[in-house]
Amino acid sequence: MSAGAIIMMIVAISLVWGGLAAAIIQLRRHPDRPE
Amino acid sequence: MATKELGREQWGTRAGFVMAAIGSAVGLGNIWRFPYIAYDNGGGAFLVPYLVALFTAGIPLLIFEYAIGHRYRGAAPRAFLPMARPAQAIGWWQVAMCFVIGTYYAVIIAWAVRYTGFSIGQQWGDNPEQFLMSDFLQVADAPGMVSSYVAGVAWPLIGVWVVTLGIVALGVRRGLEKANQIFIPLLVVLFLILVVRALFLPGAEIGLNALFTPDWSAITNGQVWIAAYGQIFFSLSVGFGIMITYASYLHRRADLSGSALVAGFANSSFEILAGIGVFASVGFMAAKSGVAVDQVVTDGIGLAFIAFPQIISTLPGGATLFGLLFFGSLVLAGLTSLISIVQVVVSAVQDRTGMRRGPSVAIVGGAIALASILLFPTSEGLYILDAVDHFINQYGIALAGLVTVITVGWLLRKLGMLKDHVNASSAVPLGQWWTITLSVITPIILGWMTWDSLRTELSTNYEDYPTSFLLIAGWGVVIGVIVIAVLISLIPWRRSVPDSEHFHLNTVEQEAGSR
């Protein structure tokens, strides 16, 4: 694989999967308030 | 307590809702559409317009639909009705589209069910294309209306409908939520095993190189941006009422924007994973046949049912397992989306008539299943499916999305109220950017997308199909769903929708603050 391809693969994975991890952590830190 | 009083079903847990929303978004398009679109539109550089589209259209639209469904607590027609009486037609438009989409989406799942079986011993033989077209689908020479029936597609299709309607009949909590809580983790596990296996194939790096090598000149190409917005829009299942319906079963204090972020990122995460799996496999095939990647790669039905069987037959070992994983994943990804599509129609009819879930599933779900079983397991089924899918996407879902944001944002000016509604219960507050993305960016992009494809449509017949065929299976269907939607919306509601059934979070917030 070319350097450009490796870099873009790492960037894509970290941004999107990292974004998912961050979104899950964020949501878990804020449990829904009971009614 | 409130649930009993109001009589509307609710998700058991927040995770259950999020999982169901992910199940709806993650569908066949994630596996067979995203990898090719990314490769064809700048490779690694596609990430830039793709992420911009996710943040300026995808996630804002998800939040928008969650907010409408949650605020007005109804499937699409009932959710639009209190905004303005004529706006319910948009809801019925979305419901009618779900009816149509459900009929053919189930057929592709039925094919995948059969191909899961064919994987054992690679029963498609040496020529998967001929096997698909002649032996399995028995496709007619020319497009037209139904002439002969294909039993090999019909019986798995009946099975798909029995399972789907069974899940929907069990209800939101025991049916949809349970099914997604089992199917989505299973899908991720199966697909992860497939990706790991694909990565160890000789030539995998050639495929990944083709997918991720950035062509930065693509960023200045308008078509690439259309492709990115189109992928985000179609992949997230926004625009046809699913997210409105799912959000209507949330409880009063549900976090809307936080859930939308998780669902949006989860959908994209699965797309990246699918891209890696598909291109590692395609790279192996290219290396094995001594050709370039662009000679092997394609998208849609050709990728799943012709290219992948070829790849599976060429594998050095474990071909059957690889086939089971790939087609099993297609079945699971498709099924979790199909149940959400059917739920939109069932839920809308329940809201409208006050019918209980059981009879509603039997009548409405039965009607979708019947249309599906009568039309598609036929020699002309593939042509009808192809034409209906193309037209309903371009001039149904995208156009309805455009009409929805213009009606709610510009004409009825509800975005400010919806923003306050979301902010009253969500941890991630929406700012002015949310209103701008929905009232400016989304209409421009959707308008541009529709205009762009309309220009092509009017200059050449889609897939060179005869005009008489496209007038029925293409234009006839998209105009038909609009006419039906308008007619249904003209019938007065016998059941009134008491305002007390809506969630007024802003008022509740103020009351809570003043106490």
Image (cartoon, coloured by chain):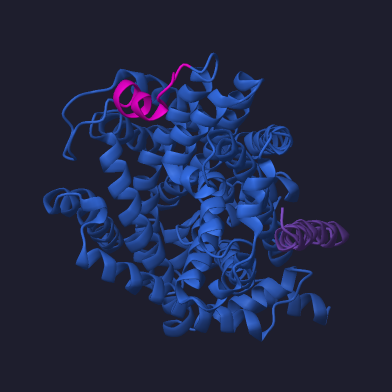
Where residue B486 sits, quadrant-wise, is bottom left
The secondary structure that most of the magenta stretch takes on is helix
Region rendered in magenta:
B123-137
* Residue B356 rendering spot, x and y as whole percentages: 47, 39
What residue is at 62 percent from the left and 67 percent from the top?
B45
Q: Which chain is purple?
A: A
* Residue B91 rendering spot, x and y as whole percentages: 40, 61
Q: Is residue B344 visible?
A: yes
Placement of B502 over or under B409, stated as above or below: above
Question: Foreground: B129 or A15?
Answer: B129
Q: Is residue B238 left or right of residue A23?
A: left
**Is B125 inside the magenta-drawn segment?**
yes
What residue is at 65 percent from the left and 42 percent from the top?
B280
* Residue B345 rendering spot, x and y as whole percentages: 42, 47
Pick the quarter of the image with the C terminus of chain B.
Answer: bottom right
Rendered colour, chain B: blue
Question: Foreground: B205 or B17?
Answer: B205
What residue is at 59 percent from the left and 61 percent from the top?
B43
**Is B355 inside the magenta-drawn segment?**
no
Placement of B106 over or under B486, stated as above or below: above
